[in-house]
Image (cartoon, coloured by chain):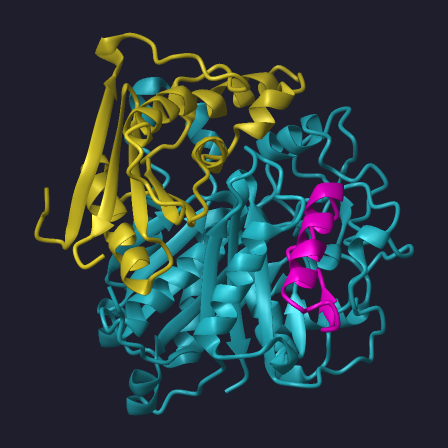
Amino acid sequence: MTRTDGLSELAWARWSAADGAPPALPGFVASDFAPSISDVADRVLSGGQASARTGLVLASSGGDLATAVATAEAVDAGKAPGALLFFQSVPNAVLGHIAKRWSLTGPVICLSPDSREQGEVEARSVARLLLRAGEADMVLMLLAEPGSAVAVLLEGDAS
Amino acid sequence: MSAPRKTVVVTGLDVTTAYGRGEDALWTGLGSGVPAFRAVDRFGTGRGRTNVAATLPGDPDLETELTAVVTNACDQAGLSETDRARTPLLLARHADGAVARLDVADQEHRPISLTARTVAAATGLFGPARTYTNACVAGTTAVIEGIMRIAAGEADRVVVAAGYLVDPDNFALFSAGRALAADGLLRPFSDKRQGLLLGDGVGAVVLESAESAERRSATVRAVLAGWGMAGDAFHVCQPHPRGEGMARAIESALRRAEWAPSDLGYVNCHGTGTKHNDASESAALHASALDDVPVSSTKSMHGHTLEASGLVELAVTILTLRHGRLPLNANYLGEDPECALRLVLDRDEKPTTDRALSLNAAFGGANAVLAVSAP
């Protein structure tokens, strides 16, 4: 499907908390953030349409709040946070997992949109810039907010 | 898709680090050869691997510091109120630990991007355009979006800012991950390096098209001649051992700039002082035929400023080209065969050309590179 912003949607997947917990993701704890993103990414990328030069663009207004809360609770209790919390402390971490699993070598980008409603608009805007500049052949757009995750594989109309 | 290309220049710059506020404080600090690390006193460091970071005195407020650097950069660029009201703000920052301590219902109303809205309003800018959160490449990514927008003719001008102030949550996380240097010094590319140390960093630049700068008779402080981004596709948090993503990002930046490796007079490396990063980055520099170009990681002096690294180190690179003196790769103890580079170890060394790269990498295998030249 092509929208007026010059991007074609090749495949998409959605997870909602109403569907139940996402599949566990080894190496990630205490939060549904990374597992839900990895789940929707897997469902889109298993279709085999992504090129190697696919970029990853994740929009999330608050990021992984559950991991941030677990860290804050440990710090406030005078305890050391678990090492796994360090590895998943930035939203890039799950993108590294997806990039390795699917051999995607494009740019790795995470952003916080101006509002939750703006997440898709802003992610598509960044995707369009990357595709137009030729820094990626396709972009896997990921949108993550509490209780929901969406993945959409995008390519430019002219590509 | 092909893009029309406009030349993108820097017309305003301000930076704050543990050396103090303003570019002169940073340049003087780097020239002193004395790292800015000291015992952290703004929170308890507990029984972590170290109690050291490169911090400003006291407990500064990030929004206040960002507002100051954006205002100063706009003043330096000579932007009128009307100019500012037409200029969007691209920001990079880490999630705010204070939000994690709010009730869940209140967290919803505190997106990470709220800072950009607040700073844009306080500085008279058009509004927030985007907030990047991709860790240690966030600042560089924000600069690259600014370049892309201007080069493609989508904007005449953008302001890009980034900030990180050393905080208890990240200090505890990096300590738990055994990433901090237990010996209290950050020793990039050195034998016996033990890890990184955090640092305060806040920076802002005004980017605009060369035509826009010329129309306003603005002073051009640097040219952003190219950029590149690529992923490692290797690991959640470790870089590719052969630096493959970084090498591709460097190649992309050089191609856009239409430069050869031999054109470069300096590379400001990511150089975190960790075993894996420095070996990976060295491999990338070798693969890019940059092993004979003078390089340093100034994190050895101002610390690792996380999301602000791209802005702080862009400022260092611009100052290096302006002053014609290469900043030290400090705290060096001797060669690691995995990091055989042309390191800047002499305080009086001068760059042989006025072209440089600034490199950043992050968890997730993210790599981002800026190609910078003197006006």
Say which colour chain B has: cyan
The image quarter in which residue B112 lies: top left
Question: Which residue is farthest right?
Answer: B334
Chain letter, colour yellow:
A
Q: In this view, does B147 lie to the left or right of B196?
A: left
Q: Is residue B271 magenta?
A: yes
**Residue range corresponding to the magenta coloring:** B269-297
x, y (%) of residue B317? 60, 71
Decide if residue B122 is in sight here: no
x, y (%) of residue B267? 65, 69
Q: In this view, does A19 lie to the left or right of B249?
A: left
Q: Which residue is drawn at 34% across and 76% down?
A: B208
Question: Which residue is farthest front?
Answer: A48
Above or below residue A46? Residue A130 is below
x, y (%) of residue B8? 38, 77
The image quarter in which residue B313 lies: bottom right
Q: Residue at x 29, y 78 (%)?
A: B80
Q: Is residue A50 left or right of residue B342?
A: left
Decide if residue B73 is in sight here: yes
Q: Which residue is drawn at 56% across and 38% down?
A: B234
Q: Is residue A93 magenta?
A: no
Instruction: Quadrant for the N terminus of chain B, please.
Output: bottom left
